């Protein structure tokens, strides 16, 4: 059993791979695709195979999937990149990777996606059967390209595709929690962010990867306690700007997801049900 993981130099991937390696049984191997050979070295030291290449290069995709049994596509381009790059990596390259996996006889393909694909809120936690509804403050090339990638991958004939939709991911030194203030500083006081700790994101993805008989299934991954803009300031030790209290939350349910399905189907239960549990455990 050989599992290829992309996006392993990123915030999620670099914390996921050591956990995937740690649960290996004898004979199981992990391969990572990195763009820069020197950034593959830490993974080689942990026992992973390393393939160097860009996700947009079809030749590199062929090398990456050769002999693989499973693929976890963590890679994405969304932090301050032009829209064309978001589309090229998040949709086009992800779908090409799916096609390459299909051609190479890969048995399982886990697509890492985002809870932003739902678009506007529905007045209740979003469930995996909710269709994507474009719009809302967080809509743009990133969620749209991820939503299209999901649709195109799930439509590939004969490939067992599963999707994990992540919340706002934090923990283990990831600067993301501090970066949340870039948005939360412009929010209403009560506006909420649904989060998930790296431990639980890895837990969710591993459960999705390892579960038998869930081809075509989509799963939300998140914790139990979305936090408000006020709490995000407090957690970061930053004074709460007075303007927050004069604003109204335009959509209180945007990107707030239900984790009922992954709990019921796959036995997921967050180790850190809230960011406070993670903080108190020293896991921020
Ligand atoms: N972090 C979150 O809060 C969050 C929330 C929801 C969903 N997600 C999803 O989780 C996944 C990982 O997110 P992240 O936060 O870890 O992102 P990240 O820190 O920006 O990492 C992105 C990864 O993708 C790789 N990558 C980008 N373009 C590539 C290309 N053309 N070829 C090969 N590799 C490429 C990057 O490689 P380089 O290091 O070479 O750039 C890096 O390893 C993404 O699919 C994202 O949509 C994340």
Image (cartoon, grey):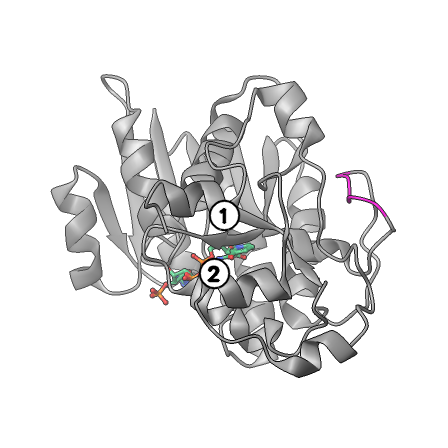
Secondary structure at badge 2 equals: helix
**Image location of residue 231, percent across then percent down:** 57, 60
Tell me if 142 is positioned left or right of 48 in this view.
right
Foreground disc of the pair 1, 2: 2
Which picture quadrant has residue 83?
Answer: bottom right
Element marked by disc 1: helix
- Give the residues in magenta: 124-128
Q: Can residue 214 be seen in this view?
A: no
Count of numbered circles in the view = 2
| Residue corresponding to mark 2 | 235
State left or right for residue 228 relative to residue 197. Answer: right
Residue 83 visible: yes
Which label was assigned to residue 275? 1
Q: Residues within 10 Å of mark 2 (few under 14, many from 20)?
A: some
Closest to the observer: 237 or 283? 237
Write down the quadrant of residue 30 in the picture: top left
Query: Which of marks 2 and 1 precedes in the sequence?
Result: 2
- Ligand 1, image quadrant it occupies: bottom left
Ligand 1 has an atom within 8 Å of the beta carbon of the residue at disc 2: no
Q: Residue at x 54, y 63 (%)?
A: 232
Q: Nearer the viewer, residue 40 or 231?
A: 231
Cα gap from disc 1 to disc 2, whole angstroms: 9 Å
Figure quadrant of the N terminus: top left
Residue 117, given in percent of the width and then of the height, sits at 71, 56
Residue 88, image x, y percentages: 56, 69
Q: Quick check: 74 above or below 87?
A: above
Q: Quadrant of residue 121?
A: bottom right
Residue 92 among those drawn in magenta:
no
Crowd band around label 1 with a 10 angstrom C-alpha radius: few (<14), some (14–19), many (20+): many
Label pair 1/2, CB-CB below 8 angstroms: yes
Magenta part mainly helix, strand or loop? loop
């Amino acid at each position: 059993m050989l599992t290829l993981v992309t996006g392993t130099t990123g915030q999620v991937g670099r914390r996921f791979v050591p956990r995937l390696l740690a649960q290996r049984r004898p004979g199981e191997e992990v391969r990572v695709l990195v763009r820069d050979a020197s950034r593959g070295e830490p993974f080689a030291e942990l026992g992973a195979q390393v393939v160097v290449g860009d996700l947009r290069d079809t030749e590199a995709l062929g090398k990456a999937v050769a002999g693989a049994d499973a693929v976890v596509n963590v890679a994405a381009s969304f932090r301050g990149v032009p829209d064309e790059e978001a589309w090229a990596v998040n949709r086009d390259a992800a779908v090409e990777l799916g096609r390459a996996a299909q051609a190479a006889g890969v048995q399982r393909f886990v697509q890492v996606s985002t809870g932003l694909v739902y678009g506007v809120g529905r007045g209740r936690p979003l469930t995996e059967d909710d269709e994507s509804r474009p719009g809302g403050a967080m809509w743009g090339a990133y969620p749209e390209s991820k939503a299209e990638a999901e649709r195109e991958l799930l439509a590939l004939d004969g490939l067992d595709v599963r999707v994990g939709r992540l919340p706002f991911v934090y923990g283990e030194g990831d600067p993301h929690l501090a970066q949340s203030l870039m948005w939360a500083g412009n929010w209403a006081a009560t506006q909420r962010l649904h989060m998930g700790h790296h431990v639980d994101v890895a837990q969710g993805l591993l459960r999705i990867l390892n579960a038998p008989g869930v081809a075509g299934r989509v799963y939300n991954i998140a914790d139990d306690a979305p936090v408000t803009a006020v709490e995000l300031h407090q957690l970061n030790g930053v004074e709460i700007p007075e303007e927050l209290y004069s604003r109204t939350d335009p959509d209180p349910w945007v990107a707030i997801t239900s984790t009922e399905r992954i709990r019921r189907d796959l036995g997921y239960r967050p180790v850190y049900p809230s960011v406070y549990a993670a903080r108190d455990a020293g896991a921020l």
